[in-house]
Amino acid sequence: MRHRTSGATTVEFALGLLIFLMLLLGILDFSRMLFTWSMASEATRAGARYAVVCDDTGQQALVLARMQALLPQITTVSVAWTPAGCTAATCEGVTVGITGLNYQWISPIVGAAAPLIPMPSFSTFLPREVMRKDPHSPTICS
């Protein structure tokens, strides 16, 4: 006598698909987090380069705008000229940093109340020797 097994195949497929989708979404979320990490690091580098090349002492909003072009999630940046209170002629360099950047998971398993994952702070220092000198891009300051 033959037993009916068509329903069992459907249940097995559904369970296998669920596990596969969980794994796939986990990999996608982790990849997005690594991309955000990499872009935050690159944004601090680009912000420091813009600040030091364009000689924008005190123009933190312009540096933030340059960095947000790479990573829109950035809301605040710190721009610290060395030594503090220097002018364009006396500055030794600039440190640009990001703090308070959070990563939002998109996996539906966590649901709508997905926790924000705090990312570490990122910072880049560039010396004054490259101020107003950029042989690769004369239009960076425009």
Image (tube, rainbow, N blue to C red):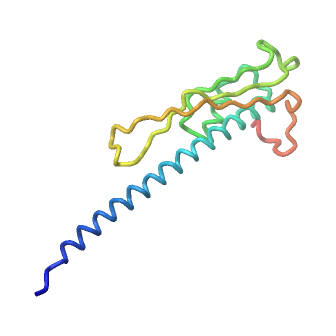
**Is 37 on the left-hand or right-hand side of 104?**
right
Residue for point 85% across, 39% down: 134
Q: Residue furthest front?
A: 1
Residue 49 lies left or right of residue 29; in this view the side is right
Task: Check the image and name the residue furthest to the bottom.
Answer: 1
Image quadrant containing the C terminus: top right
Q: Residue at x 77, y 12 (%)?
A: 85
Q: Which x, y percent locates residue 139?
A: 78, 41
Q: Is residue 91 above or below residue 135?
A: above
Residue 67 position in % (x across, y down): 64, 36
Residue 118 position in % (x across, y down): 51, 32
Q: Residue at x 47, y 49 (%)?
A: 29
Q: Report which quarter residue 129 is drawn in.
A: top right
52, 127: nearer the viewer: 127
Residue 122 place in picture, x, y as percent: 64, 32
| The N terminus sits in image quarter | bottom left
User: Which residue is rendered at x = 44% and y = 43% of the image?
Assistant: 105
